[in-house]
Image (spheres, rainbow, N blue to C red):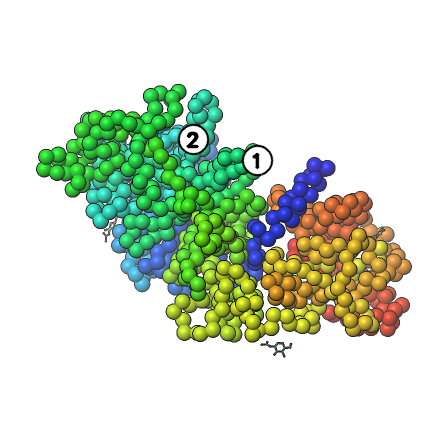
Amino acid sequence: MRAAAAAAACWLWGALLAAGRSLPRLRLPYRELLSTNRSVLFFGLRGPLGFRSLYLDEYRDRLFVGGKDVLYSLRLDRAGMDAKEIYWPPVPGQTEECVRKGKDPATECANYVRLLHPYNRTHLLACGTGAFRPLCAFVYVGHRGEHAFALEPAGAENGRGRCPHEPDRAFASAVVGGELYAGLTADFLGRDPVIFRSMGTRSALRTETDQRLLSDPKFVAAYLIPDSDDRDDDKVYFFFTEKVAEADGKEHTVFSRVARICVNDVGGQRVLVNKWSTFNKARLVCSVPGPGGIDTHFDELEDIFLLRTKDGKSPEIYALFSTVSHVFRGSAVCVYHMADVREVFNGPFAHRDSPLHQWAAYEGRVPYPRPGVCPSKTTNQPRRQYSTTKDYPDDVLRFARAHPLMYKPVYPRHRQPLLVKTDLQHHLHQLVVDRVEAEDGQYDVLFLGTDTGSVLKVVALQKANSAATEDIILEELQVFKAPVPITQMEISVKRQMLYVGSSLGVAQVRLHQCESYGTACAECCLARDPYCAWDGTACARYQPAGKRRHRRQDVRHGNPMHQCLDQNLTVDDFERVEEKVLYGAEHNSTFLECAPRSPQASVQWFVQRPPDEQRDEVKTDERILQTEQGLLFRTLHRHDAGVYYCKTLEHGFTQTVTKTALEVIEREQLEHGFQRELEGEPARPPCPEPTPRPGAPTHKAWFKDIMHLISYTNLQRVEEYCARLWCGDRQRRKSKLAKAKHALAAMDVGKRGQATKPHGGRNRVPRQAAAT
Ligand SMILES: *[C@@H]1O[C@H](CO)[C@@H](O)[C@H](O)[C@H]1NC(C)=O
Ligand SMILES: *[C@@H]1O[C@H](CO)[C@@H](O)[C@H](O)[C@H]1NC(C)=O
Ligand SMILES: *[C@@H]1O[C@H](CO)[C@@H](O)[C@H](O)[C@H]1NC(C)=O
Ligand SMILES: CC(=O)N[C@H]1CO[C@H](CO)[C@@H](O)[C@@H]1O
């Protein structure tokens, strides 16, 4: 109990310290995203979707979704999406077989569709786990404009080596020229890691079973990235992590890797028959310099996003990493240039004489054609004819087999991460990037999928004249109501949409909704969102080629003083916000909530006590505490009654956020009023714990933490107070309060003047109650 309280206090402290750094400027809850049409959700048409894969088809304006025993096709150009479904269960008898082999019927013995790729002009390739017997099939999707969707009647074929057996084990795949490249564990037991090429007309190719090639890999992504204009030079890149034994052979460390193979690799003639002959891999480094010259490494690759360039040869590689050390947890994003990747593959091979030796750069003679080079015009000269890998000399293949690893690692741009987060509440799993044109240049906007159903929208700013970056969390979007991990994200720049998948379903989320920042120039400016600018009348999507003259935007500094000078920065808008009424009991504690939309704003409290018209700043002391979430009265006095205004200030812009009429129910009335009524009732249960999620306190838990922190010793009373505030039967409460109010009114006629609101008034329930 004590430990838990300490942990909570610790969390709170951490959160206080982190304020401003890792707090999003705007937090958009689930309901708000839906009610403002920022997001549209799809949960499937037959119970839990069990989402596993999606393919965004920008040409056909369709989204294809793979789930548990189902495939869907959604039309993105129609409001209703016109969902079409294909039911695709495992082959008959396989579900029973799967259960018989000891797998879980509820979570494993179904056909989880894990692979969806465009195959040719009319067909997709789909593969599923088939209840631990993978299967693949072609899906007819028709031509552009029609909404056809049917599994090819020819039926399913064996998906072994193309799709994992397990619903959740990491794997990566790509279709290139009608062939499927897959990085996965290909057997029932999950012990045979392999990069496998199949389908098409050539014979299948795989990696040798060898720890040196793949050691307990977790595949993250696979992409075709052409090396030059010569198609013979095309390579497929795999991104994954693997476990590497330390020198002592006992400890294992996780490293992130990039590996590549030639598309025209057909294996060797005598050595490496039907095995890759061009496989090479290198380490991907993402680290920050630490004190004492010891770098902190982010080694667990989570996701890769390729920001494609026009020629397709030099995409920028954005990689999301995490680290889980004894000391801290964190995430980082590093960006790699293809030129740096190629340089490492053209550099020295790693070599060691035995597993007990240190790795060194191989300095001996490297045979020709250099291992890793694809057979092409360059290798196929009149005097040295190597037109396929089958022509490669045995010594080349033997060298390739013995030296799969490059000596040098690939370092990121500027040798440091673009973004580091060590103080977030959640883990980051998914990443997509949009390069956005703004008034003063281009910005990288990162969308980061968390493990709690939300997406963070972050802008990374390169500081002037230095490699250092600053990042701002513009928004936190609670896409899914439940705290589920985001497992896939795709972006449509054309549609300005994000597609977000979790096991529950798929969401289509707008990249921006500029109105949500507010209706004033200053609010738009403070948002610092490169997608948005003040156009003279509203906060709207910034159009680089737009006609409007007076666009104001300040992504770099977010300073409304410069941008919105002719606008009112200080508006005496005290009367503009809706008034809420809050009842507090004399001598008890009470809490006035005011969490500004931007946690980066500072808060000031004013009070107007009847019959005074004057508004004074609230004086805080031992008894009245100003916290990040609002104003806390440890013991309420009669003279505290009044109207409280919460004002925020951010970069010179002030605004009234809440207006609360605090009514103090005096002790005597309480005792005579509803206190007596309660006597006949059974003791109230304590507050039930909200949806348990460690490290993410709800308002209620938070409130209790505050009470602990300020050494509020009477725990029972805190519990009671909470019970009343958060889980009390609202109806009962209302009627009680009404009675108490009547009692008050009868005794106090005229005393309070206008501060006493009629019972029909708005929002009689405190905001916290409504929020839970
Ligand atoms: C959201 O979309 C629905 C249907 O298209 C529309 O009726 C509604 O007015 C929209 N709501 C908002 C806040 O734009
Ligand atoms: C696409 O591939 C499928 C499956 O191999 C085949 O049946 C179909 O004819 C192909 N379509 C085109 C246009 O090549
Ligand atoms: C600024 O505020 C004053 C007084 O509140 C008001 O009269 C004026 O119209 C406002 N100006 C603008 C540009 O909103
Ligand atoms: C309404 C309310 O919370 N009343 C409590 C105020 O504090 C006393 C103890 O000092 C409690 O007995 C009341 O229930």
Q: In the depicted view, which residue is nearer to us: 753 or 522?
A: 522
The CA span between labels 1 and 2 is: 21 Å
Which residue matches tag 1?
327
Q: Amino acid at mark 2?
A: Lys
The spot of residue 518 in percent (x, y) is 56, 67
Q: Is residue 311 above or below residue 233?
A: below
Q: Position of residue 329 (x, y in %)?
A: 54, 39
Disc 2 is placed on an element classified as strand
Left or right: residue 637 compared with residue 201:
right
Q: Is residue 233 above or below residue 623?
A: above
Pick the front one: 215 or 725: 215
What residue is shown at x 86% (from left), y 65% (from top)? 743
- For label 1, count other residues whose C-alpha is less than 10 Å away and answer few (under 14), some (14-19) or many (20+): few
Q: Label 2, on which residue? A: 243
Residue at the spot 50% in from the left edge and 52% down from the top edge: 470
Q: Residues within 10 Å of mark 2 (few under 14, many from 20)?
A: some
- Residue 487 visible to an observer of this rendering: no
For label 1, being within 8 Å of ligand 4 is answered: no
Q: Is residue 249 above or below residue 6?
A: above
Whether residue 709 is visible to the viewer of this picture, yes or no, is yes
Task: Tell me which corner region of the image, top left, top right, bottom left or bottom right, holds residue 2.
Answer: top right
N-term-proximal mark, 1 vs 2: 2
Callout 1 amino acid: Val
Count of numbered tags = 2
